[in-house]
Amino acid sequence: QVQLVESGGGLVQPGGSLRLSCAASGSIFTINIMGWYRQAPGKQRELVATITSSGTTTYANSVKVRFTVSRDNAKNTVDLQMNSLNPEDTAVYYCYVRRFRTPTYEYWGQGTQVTVSS
């Protein structure tokens, strides 16, 4: 079992910044992929950004340049620095981890609300 604890969500004005953090604990081994997804009301969950254990990143086109994902392999944490936020970024953000090797696993965090509004 792997537990994920997220922090850092909240209310921010358009143009502002927020930093999300996620810490993984439990029977972890090496996490191959860590990252963030989001789900806005009435929409499907979508990828925001992921990062592999070797540092390769993937971003949704809508957040490239504005968001930066990073991880600390020793601490099993993943962060998402979000800049130049706009109302379209309003969503519940979910931490995500996946391991491909045995024991394989895939876990989601409980979600943290990000609201961008004036």
Image (tube, rainbow, N blue to C red):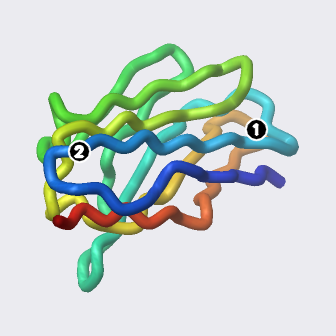
> Which image quadrant is residue 42 in?
bottom left
State the image quarter where residue 100 is shown.
top right
The structure residue drawn at horizontal position 60% and vertical position 66%, both measured from the top left corner, is 110
Q: Residues within 10 Å of mark 1 (few under 14, many from 20)?
A: few
- Image location (x, y in percent) of residue 105: 69, 50
Which residue has dot 1 on it?
Answer: 102
Label 1 is placed on what type of residue? Thr
- Name the residue located 78 percent from the left edge and 50 percent from the top edge: 2
* Residue 47 percent coordinates (x, y): 32, 52
Dot placed on the residue nearer the N-terminal end, 2 or 1: 2
What is the number of the mark on residue 114? none
Residue pointed to by mark 2 = 16
- Disc nearest the viewer among 2 and 1: 2
Direction from residue 34 to residue 58 in the image, left or right: left
Q: Quadrant of the N terminus?
A: bottom right
Task: From this view, report whether residue 110 is shown above or below residue 12.
Answer: below
- Residue 93 versus residue 85: which sits nearer the camera? 85
At horizontal 49% and vertical 58% (from top left) the residue drawn is 94
- Compared with residue 89, is residue 63 higher up or lower down, i.e. above or below? above
How far is the residue under mark 2 from the one under mark 1?
A: 41 Å
Classify residue 72 as left or right of residue 51. right
In this rendering, position of residue 73 left or right of residue 2: left
Closer to the camera in the image, 18 or 40: 18
Asked if residue 50 is positioned above or below residue 12 in the image, the reply reads above
Image quarter of the C terminus: bottom left
Three-letter code for the amino acid on which mark 2 is drawn: Gly
